[in-house]
Structures are given as structure tokens and as C-alpha cells.
Image (cartoon, grey):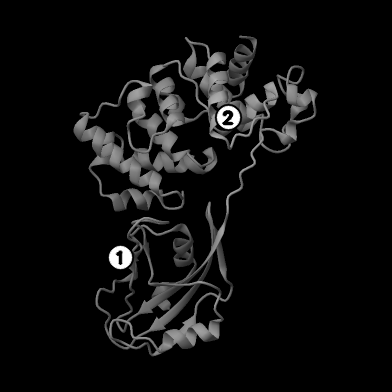
Amino acid sequence: MEFSNSLINWYLQNKRDLPWRNTVNPYPIWLSEIILQQTRVAQGLPYFMAFMEAFPTVFDLANTEEEQVLKLWQGLGYYSRARNLHATAKFIATSLNGNFPSNYKELLQLKGIGEYTAAAIASFAYNEPVAVVDGNVFRVLSRYFNVDSDISDGKTKKEFQILAQELLPKNNAALFNQAIMEFGALQCVPKNPNCENCIFSSSCAALQYKKVNTLPVKSKKIKVTNKYFNYLILKDVQGNFVVQKREGKGIWENLYEFPLIETEELVSEIDFLNQIALQDFYNLKPVEVFVLNNNLIQHKLSHQKLHIRFFQLNFDQKISGSQPFSEIQKLPFPIVIHNFMQSHDFNSL
């Protein structure tokens, strides 16, 4: 218990004051955990505050439209989290009368909740003695105990889960889980941790064997695919624009974008301008076509690298379905398109 007690004592002296830590209400705890998946606390905190202000209860979240959820989520990425968040809120509100499941096994049945998130909610809200294992926990345990198993391997996760469970104080699960994650986030960080001023400097195996920078071991590399997106800003004679909703599975599902032509490789601007100038759009031909961003925008996703250009096409007639820019701004867009819209004065295009 020496490791666990030292970790908890460190936490009580060094923890950040975060709003979801000041409650045992499962709703804000669940909301924070979904937001913080794949997201740093500094980035996620403003989103958490915005969601709690817009949707103080699970019923408020359940009763809103998905588009409003996606608009608030805009910029966080991994938008399936937002769609699952909304679907789960509706299920809890309608099927469970607003009551969250009160144990790990039942929480696992909810959409968008995996083993880590279920353990976090169960321990933080109900103090159920189930250990959390996330990237921070992998790092702390692998270094302290010199575990060099590959964390990309599914069997390794079970190995760490067993170890974390053995260390977990059964009557203090919430505090220990918060402590080990906070220790990984603030002290035992991925690169250049301050090992000299660490409470475990005399007992950490990785420090003793000079393996801090090589643990945890993770061999699997993500294959990144290059994609080439050419967005068309269609402006009609009334100064309105055309947007469309992305359908089907894939990146940015249910978000909005401008009409898109995707190419297998980077086509020269001149060739592409000539190509689109000859096309009919809504049975109309553009009277003017030009590139809007001189520098190719590169946007990195987990498995894809997008190379993005924007072209403006002006028409001397009304385009069916076009909207004023003031209305388009209210819709949820991928952050790379949102940023482009923010950096250009669409009223004077």
C-alpha cells in the first residue's frame, strides 16, 4: 500500500481544481470523461463548461437537436463522441428516467462507454472499486514497475488492469484513480519528466535502469493516408452560398461542408480551375472561378492527412438551396472549414 498511499498524498497536495471533481453526480462526470477522451484537460475544460451551461441536466441534452450538440462540439474532433453522447443522453432520459446505471457492468452497456470510461464513472460517482487504465496509467505503472510489455497488444491491457486493480485501495477507489491519472498528467509526463523532483525517485524501476524514455513500449504505428479535398464556394447572384451535410460513415459524419471534389492526388491549380469552369452546377455555369487560398491547408487526423484548397465560383443567377452566410454560420462544420470561414469575410467575397 506504500505506492498507493504515496500517490494519494501527492494528489491531495498537487491536484488541479476541476469542476467535475467536486461532485459525485454521474452526469457531469460522464460528460467530462467523454470530452476528455483523446483531449487534453486545458482544451476540454471550456467545452465542458459550455455544455454544462447549455445542458445542465441529461434531460436538457437529450431534448436538444443533434446539430446543436455538434455545433458546441466543433473543434474537439472525433465527432462520433458527440453523436454517441447525444444518443446515450436520449436513452438515459427516456429509458432510464434520467437515472444513470450505478455500477461498472451496466455502465459498459451504454453507447460510447468503454472499459476505461465505465471504470471512471463507477469509481468517481459511486466509489466502486474498479481500477481505471488509460494512457497516463500505462505510463506510470510501466515506468514504476519496469513493465516492458507492448501496450499495443490487447493482452498487455489485461496485464496492466490486473496490476492496477491490485494496487487499488478498495475503500478509496475514486481518490486513487484520480491520483494515478493526475500523476501521469502532471508529473510522470511522456517526454522529459522531472524525475529528480518525483516522490518515487528512489523506488522507480525505470529511473533506476535508465528506461524512463523508452517506457511504455508501443510498437504499432498508425498508417496515415493522404487525401486531397477541393472545396467549392458557390456564390449566387444574391450573395448566398451552398453547403451540404456529410452523410454516411466516415470523417465528419453529420457535419456541414461546402461542395467537395476529392482527387486522388494534388492537381495543379490551373488544371483544376479549367476543369471546374467547364462544369455545370445546378444546371448553371459559373461566370468567374478562382482559388481562395494560395497556400495549401494541411489538416491532420488520426489516420488521415488532408490537403485542402478552397475555390470560389461566382454565378449570375440564383442557386436553389443557397443560404445567407449568417444562417450558414449557425451550422456545425469541421474545425478546418470553420477556421477558414472565420478568416475570410464572406459578406465581401
- The local secondary structure at tag 1 comes to helix
Q: Circle 1 is placed at which residue position?
A: 327
Dot 1 alpha-carbon crowd within 10 angstroms: few under 14, some 14 to 19, many 20 or more:
few
**Quarter of the N terminus within the rendering:** top right
| Any part of residue 24 in sight | no
Q: Circle 2 is placed at which residue position?
A: 156
What amino acid type is highlighted by mark number 2? Thr
Residue 86, percent from left and from top: 31, 42
**Quarter of the C terminus within the rendering:** bottom left
Task: Report the residue at 36% width, 38% height from top.
Answer: 52
Task: Report the residue at 79% width, 25% height from top.
Answer: 209
Residue 61, percent from left and from top: 28, 40
Q: CA distance from mark 2 to mark 1?
A: 50 Å
Task: Report the residue at 69% width, 22% height from top.
Answer: 144
Above or below, 258 against 83 in this view is below
Query: Counting residues from the N terminus, which is met first, the one under dot 2 or under dot 1?
Result: 2
What amino acid type is highlighted by mark number 1? Glu
